[in-house]
Amino acid sequence: MPKTFIDLFAGIGGFHWALKELGYKCLLAVEKDEDAQEIYKRNFEQEECDFKIRRGGPTVCNRLIGDIRSLTRPSAEEKKEYRAATIAKRLKEEFNIMTGDVGVICGGFPCQPFSKSGVQKGSRDETRGTLFRDILLLTKALKPDFLILENVRNLAGPKHKETLKVIIHRIKKLGYEIEPEPIVLSPHELPIDLGSPQVRDRVFILARKVALRRGNHPKKVSEEVKKLKERPKPTWDAGMILDQSAAEDYRLNEAEMNWIHLWEDFLHIVDGMRIPGAPIWIDAFPGDQTEQKNKPKDKPMPDWEERFRKINLDFYNDICSQPDRKRKLEKWLKAIRENKPTPEGDLKYLVPASRRKFEWQANLAFPKNTGRTLKGLLIQFRPSGIRVKPATHYPALVAITQTTIIGPKVHSKLDSGHYRYITPKEAARLQGMDAIDFNKQPDPLCYKQLGNAVNVKVIKYLAEKLMA
């Protein structure tokens, strides 16, 4: 088996980092995003391979191109596709890559909707027009020994049942062994020496060429993962990926610290009380609700809102049943509801609506409901509210701006006294890209790219199981 791979929809190189650690060489990478291309090229410089692949001479490793359809069609805009033989010929002539030279085709492919009529009729064209179709074309042309594909968790959900069935069927038809149920795995489910403290469920589709004697059947890998999940969960520590210090730029600004202090005060007010599982929604507490008064009242209240309001009203009444708590809460509500006139003559809260919502998910850190503090927890500023979790494993890195905040006591040895965001370097560790070089790329773009990336630890684990 050639220890080579083609990296499709490569991003900033999650698959590449994993397979490189296993001794594989990248014959060709495909990534359309120009910013991601720059990071990929910086970390995986193009070079002449130091070995000869079978039936071919020396070739160039880490070659990067921008569009998968430049390989499979006369032009990216055309619907017309090349036949497999034509694709194979072009790859040989342009890249010195021949059928049989590629050990693995991998990629985190975009999940575009397939033709419903094609799915229902069993049509051969149900994937036509999708980028998954281009993976099939390259697989048919190059006949790699293995496929390792990644997608979002929802691909294995009920809404995408038919789409997944088509994917499995089409890969099988090309002559590959594949499990009908894909693997769903997160890096925090791996042993501590193999994984990372991040909840990131993703779907992985593994395939092995029929009659190939090397490696393992995907079914065996799936069974190994099932056994892994049946074992006791690892005990993670969020502090394990943190640096000793971080620049002041990552500290929270004055407004953000004001929100933190307000909710820290709230925890003191309700010390000893059970906090509801539903979000705390200050606009559902009785009192002066400036912005609520300006909203039209002709629409009926949705069931979820009615339920949340009742939970919050009950909690409010429980707090106010004790005079001392009631007095403190009234003073606190006055602070969080501070407002100012708008140019239109209305009043507007200084604390945004999303920061007047509080999603407490840290009961495990304080089983007795006493001594609660944000200082040793993980925090996210989300559109749905301020979400708080124990400092065990991090929520999934995402491409949008919800970078995790760590309290000053998340790692006792690193207590700086400041709340701060995790740095791009720390976020890269969560993804298993410890050595990645972003150069001087802006932080928001680094977070976005990492949020879009495949987790290196999971890919390495599955690749070893599949190709050992």
Image (cartoon, grey):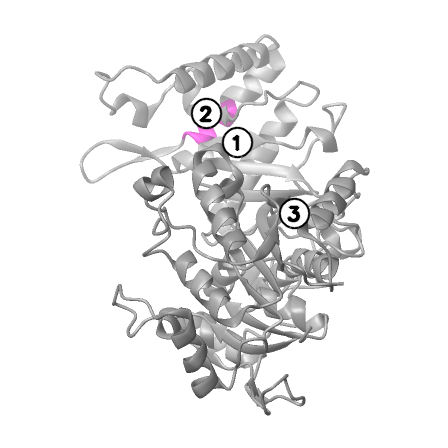
Query: What label sits on residue 449 in the rendered view?
Result: none
Question: Left or right: 26 with respect to 373?
Answer: left
The N terminus lies in quadrant: bottom right
Position of residue 159 relative to residue 286, above or below, is below
Position of residue 246 relative to residue 275, above or below, is below
The answer to whether residue 285 is visible is: no
Question: Looking at numbered disc 3 in the image, what kind of residue is underneath it?
Answer: Ser
Dot 2: element: helix
Q: Nearer the viewer, mark 2 or mark 3?
A: 3
Dot 1: element: strand
> Closer to the camera, 145 or 427?
145
Label 3 sits on residue: 186
Dot 3: element: loop
Question: What whole-number distance in Å separates the C-alpha atoms at marks 2 and 1?
Answer: 9 Å
Question: What whole-number distance in Å separates the C-alpha atoms at marks 1 and 3?
Answer: 26 Å
Label 1 sits on residue: 358
Residue interval drawn in magenta: 331-337
Contact (CB < 8 A) between labels 2 and 1? yes
Q: Nearer the viewer, mark 1 or mark 3?
A: 3
The C terminus lies in quadrant: bottom right
Position of residue 374 relative to residue 20, above or below, is above
Position of residue 260 relative to residue 63, above or below, is above
Graded by Cα atoms within 10 Å as few (under 14), some (14 to 19) or many (20 or more), the crowding at tag 2 reads: many
Label 2 sits on residue: 282
Q: Is residue 180 in the magenta section?
A: no
